[in-house]
Structures are given as structure tokens and as C-alpha cells.
Image (tube, rainbow, N blue to C red):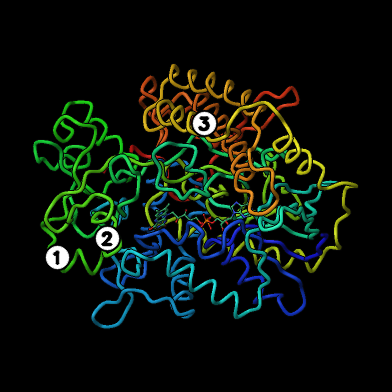
Amino acid sequence: MHYEFDAVVVGAGGAGLSAALELARQVGQTHRIAVLSKLYPVRSHTGAAQGGIGAALGNVEEDHWEWHAFDTVKGSDYLADQDAVEIMCREAIECVYDLEHYGLPFSRLEDGRIAQRRFGGHTRNYGEGPVHRSCYAADRTGHMILQTMYQQCLKHDVKFFDEFHVLDLIIHQGRCAGVVAYEIATGRLHTFHAKAVLFATGGFGRMYKVTSNALALTGDGVAIAFRRGIPLEDMEFFQFHPTGIYRLGILITEGARGEGGILRNNDGERFMERYAPTIKDLAPRDMVSRAIYWEIRNGRGINGKDYVHLDLTHLGREIIETRLPDITDFVRTYLGIDPVKEPIPVTPTAHYAMGGIPTDVDGRVVTDASNTPLPGFYAAGECACVSVHGANRLGTNSLLDILVFGRRAARHMAQYIQQVDMPAMPDDPEQWSRQTIARLMEGDGGERHGQIRAELQSLMMDNVSVFRTEETLKTALEGLAGLKERYGRVTVQDKGRRFNTDLLEAIELGNLLELAEVTTFAARQRTESRGGHYREDYPNRDDQNWLKHSLVSRGEDGGLVWDSKPVVITRFQPQERKY
Ligand SMILES: Cc1cc2nc3c(=O)[nH]c(=O)nc-3n(C[C@H](O)[C@H](O)[C@H](O)COP(=O)(O)OP(=O)(O)OC[C@H]3O[C@@H](n4cnc5c(N)ncnc54)[C@H](O)[C@@H]3O)c2cc1C
């Protein structure tokens, strides 16, 4: 089928829904808007977010958006663009009240105002001590955001194409002209011709073996943009969250430490006191994850094993069961442990992509170091890099990012689609998608995508996770070259057209391999340590040479090409990062 829309949003998580809702409100009466999602919307990963959304409401104690901005910049190890951070922290307050007005059931203070809790790296008065800034709905904040936004979109008659898997982006004569999607129920390809396209396709934690990310987080949008010539920004920065359930990677929200939870080693010691004397267990994630591994390396893992304890037992049943009900269930279900009585075994888990598709503060995708936009192409949410998180994201700032920049992108798109005509289309927009499917369905190479995916995840976990060196990165790049070569011989077993998840998983693997290569390449280039990127062979931050964003693209000879662009600094000069 060939569809025509004015604006197409790809992805129905928080970023996609917030954009779709704003488009519907602004131009929904006169313009055609569609949302395409490979998942049924409320199954998007935003629904798994537990801890909260950051905004300086000041409901519990004094707070200011400028303090929030400072924390975000410091948390980013000074790599975030400060103009974007200022916008995010300022607009945060209005964003949270909008959610309240849409009907989101926030947890409340006794006087009825929105409750707020502490979170890692969020401080009072430029670093004095932890502040209550995270607005939450128990430990189901993302679930509530997703339900609320989806209901609002339905109310505004947004057109949804559920279980449409986007395979390709159409760029023609210097403009973005639409997307090609595969309908999962029928196996048919469809072309969506549009004046503007927004990618809100989420992250790619499935590149790693132990991750908090849902199965669907394979970075499709990021890989598609890259294949179509968009450079990727800051891909060496991937966040490991300190508290995944041991071996399973399932997340225990930082809100658990925000409520007073403590990390302990085998001696029962609260070891974060040594690493971050002022804010201790509420230090930013990159620091806590490294500290956990240092404890384990020094033989202080629990019973000599490779995990530590998250201790909530002193909080009491009341707080645990009312403020952290879902994670309490997870722990009881998956570990058979009652967190009211026993500490929880945890290790770091791959969690969040700081890097992605480069955009400006209006969500426009930019194509080079001088920030030249590609007309009609937008990105927002975890797939994008605006960049508000720099080298390390603070907890609660992603839910904020997706809402603020999803909406801002939509506002720009609404203007744009009123000004331009439909773009021209290439002769055969589905060519790449058709050929790719045919190769995977009809080949006889004998490789299985599941096997390659498992090897990829182990390779990345062992060599490109919390600690990196020249040697591990070289090993990873060599391993990836071998896996990519084998990927060329993958054949899917299911030859049917209906709900062919075998085929889709093979396509997703192609995307993960691409992004793993870019991540590793970028990590090898950056010979310093900053935020989530820690090089044991270059353990210090080096502002002289590396206070800049990386941009990686594919050169004409098929190799990767490295470039950089400056960091925007407005009010906070880089300082040593201590807590
Ligand atoms: C367990 C967990 C807990 C978290 N807790 C918090 C928290 O408390 N606070 C916080 O700020 N952040 C948290 N985060 C991070 C935050 O939730 C995510 O970064 C954010 O929700 C991402 O939103 P998104 O809209 O960009 O993407 P997602 O919500 O991941 O949505 C992606 C969408 O893209 C669609 N899509 C993807 N590929 C395709 C394709 N090829 N074709 C069509 N559609 C496609 C999917 O169907 C989906 O609808 C958490 C993350 C996890 C994993």
C-alpha cells in the first residue's frame, strides 16, 4: 500500500506519543498525522520506567531549575550542551503540570501536591546534598505516563498503525520523504509518503548480555538513520545502571536508594561513603557502577562472588510496600527474596544510550559538525542525542527529555508541514527493504541469527561495558567484523508471511551489529575517561583534547569515519567532578 500523511511519527513510547499529541493539538484538524509502532503502544519501554521524572517543583524543599541544570551538566561530566539542558530543566515544570492535567495519578504529599523523592546526582544549591526532585507514581511512573499519553492521543483521534515495523527511511533530493514499513500481521510492505518524519524509536540495550532493556530495544531507528548517511553522536557513552538484579539485569530503580536504600559489600560496609562522601549511595550512576566493580575486584563481593547487596531492610515494610511495590514484587518473584527482611543481590546492568541521532533543540536531525539540518527529518527521545545527557545521564532526566523534546520537535514539525509541499519520491522506495527480506528469506548460508546475537551480546559485555582498554576494544572490533561477515549468511527458518518474528529478529540483529561497531569504534577513538566511558589505560578526563562530541559516519570505502563538534557551554565552566 501507499499511504500519504503530512507527518509520520515512528515509535509510540513517551517521546512518540508526546510528539503525536502535540501535533494533533496544533494541526490535527487540518493535517494528517500517523504513528507507526512495531509494538502495541503501551508495550513500549517507557512503560517500564519506575523511579520518576525530574522537575524543580520545590514541593518538599526549596529547589530551582538552575540547580537542576547544574546537576545535569555536572552529571554529564560537562559534555552536555548547556543551551539544551537549560531548555529541558526550565520546561520540566510545565511538563509535569501538563501531565497532571492530563490525569496522571502522581503520588501525593499529605497536602495534595505532587510528591517528590531523592535521586542520584540531584542536589540542593549546586552540590550541597541530595534534594527531593523526582516526581513519581509509586514505582510505576513510566507506565502511568504511557497510559495517560495514549488515552490523550486516542481522544485527539491520532491515527495509529500498530505492529508496523519500520525498515527504511526515504531521503530524496535532499529532503526526507517518508518511511517504508513491514506490516507484522501480513508480511506486506507499505510506503508512507510524508512531508515530515519523526523517529522516536528508543534505545539499544539489547546489544549487551545483561540489560534492563526490553527485548524490542534494538536501535532500529538509529541504525536506519546511520545507514542513510546520518552521522551518530557520542555513541561511546552507554550507561550501566548500578542496580540490576544479579545475573538477570532486571532493574531495581534508583528510587530505592532515593528512599534510603544502601549498597553494602561483603563486610557489610556502606562502601559508597568512600567513593562519594557527600551524596554517598546517591552518586551518579557511572560512579556507583564503577565502585561496585572495584569492590568486587578487591574481593569484597558477597561471599567472594561478583555482586553486592542493596539493603532496604531498615526502611520498614510500610515504605517498601507503598513506595516500591513493583520492585518488591520482582524481587519476590524472581529471587524468592523478601526485600523487607533480606538484602537484594545486584550488579550493574546495561541501561541507557546517551548517544544517538544528532538533533538541535527543535528535534531537527542534523547531518554534520556545523549542524546542517536535513529538511523534514526529526528525532526525539532515547534514539536522539540533543545532547542533554552528555557522557552520563542522571536518573529521571530521560522521562523528562522524551516529553520536553518530543513536544518541541512536534511544534517545529507543525510549522514546517504547513509551509512545504509533499516531497518528490524516488522510483522504487521499497527496493532496499525488499532485497533485504529476500536475502534473509531465500539465502542458504546456514547461519542462525540467535547464535550470532548471543555472541554479540557476550562480546560487548566482556569488552565494551563499564571498563574499557585499547586491548578490549580491539578484541571487540575484530570479533564484530567476524560476526558481521557471518551475518551475511543468515537465513531465517520461518518462510511464512504472518507474524514472522524470525525474520524481524534477523533484521534487528543487523541493526544491533551496526550500532555495536559504531559504539566500539567511537570508544577506541576517545583516549580519555569521561562519564560512562571509562578507559583503564586513560583514567583521567582530558578537557584539553576531548571536551567535544564525537560524530561517526560510514565512509565511501565502507570504513567508519570519525569527526567531532564543540560542546555548547553557557553558564557552567567545566570543573573537577567530585561528590
Ligand atoms: C527498566 C527501565 C526503567 C527506567 N526508569 C526510568 C525512570 O524512572 N526515569 C527516567 O527518566 N528514565 C527511566 N528509564 C529510561 C526511559 O524510560 C527511556 O529512556 C525512555 O522511556 C525512552 O522513551 P522513548 O519514547 O524514546 O522510547 P521507548 O519508550 O523505548 O519507545 C520506542 C518506541 O519505538 C517503537 N519502535 C522501535 N523500533 C521501531 C521500528 N523499527 N518500527 C516501528 N516502531 C519502532 C517501539 O514500538 C516503541 O513504541 C528507564 C528505562 C528502563 C529500561
Q: Measured along the vertical axis of the image, is residue 455 above or below residue 9? A: above
At x 74%, y 59%, the residue is 196
- Residue 317 - label: 1
Q: Image check: 555 left or right of 449?
A: right
At x 26%, y 71%, the residue is 60
Q: Give the mark nearest the N terminus, 3 or 2.
A: 2
Q: Image check: 543 left or right of 190?
A: left
Front residue (pair 35, 115): 35
x, y percent for residue 183: 70, 56
Q: Which-is-in-front pick, marks 3 and 2? A: 3
Q: Is residue 315 visible?
A: yes
Q: Which residue is identified by label 2?
A: 329
Spatial CA span between label 1 and label 3? 43 Å
Crowd around label 1: few <14 · some 14–19 · many ≥20 (10 Å): few
Q: Which-is-in-front pick, marks 1 and 2? A: 2
Q: Secondary structure at mark 2?
A: helix
How many marks on residues?
3
Spatial CA span between label 1 and label 2? 13 Å
Q: Give the mark nearest the N terminus, 1 or 3.
A: 1
Q: Quadrant of residue 6?
A: bottom right
At x 76%, y 38%, the residue is 438
Q: Amino acid at mark 1?
A: Arg
Q: Is residue 357 visible?
A: no
Q: Which residue is identified by label 3?
A: 451
Q: Give the mark nearest the N terminus, 1 or 2.
A: 1
Q: Which-is-in-front pick, marks 1 and 3? A: 3
In the picture, the quarter occupied by the N terminus is: bottom right
| The residue positioned farthest toward the bottom in the image shown | 111
Spatial CA span between label 3 and label 2? 32 Å
Q: Are marks 1 and 3 in contact (CB under 8 Å)?
A: no
| Disc 3 Cβ-to-ligand 1 distance below 8 Å | no
Q: Amino acid at mark 2?
A: Asp
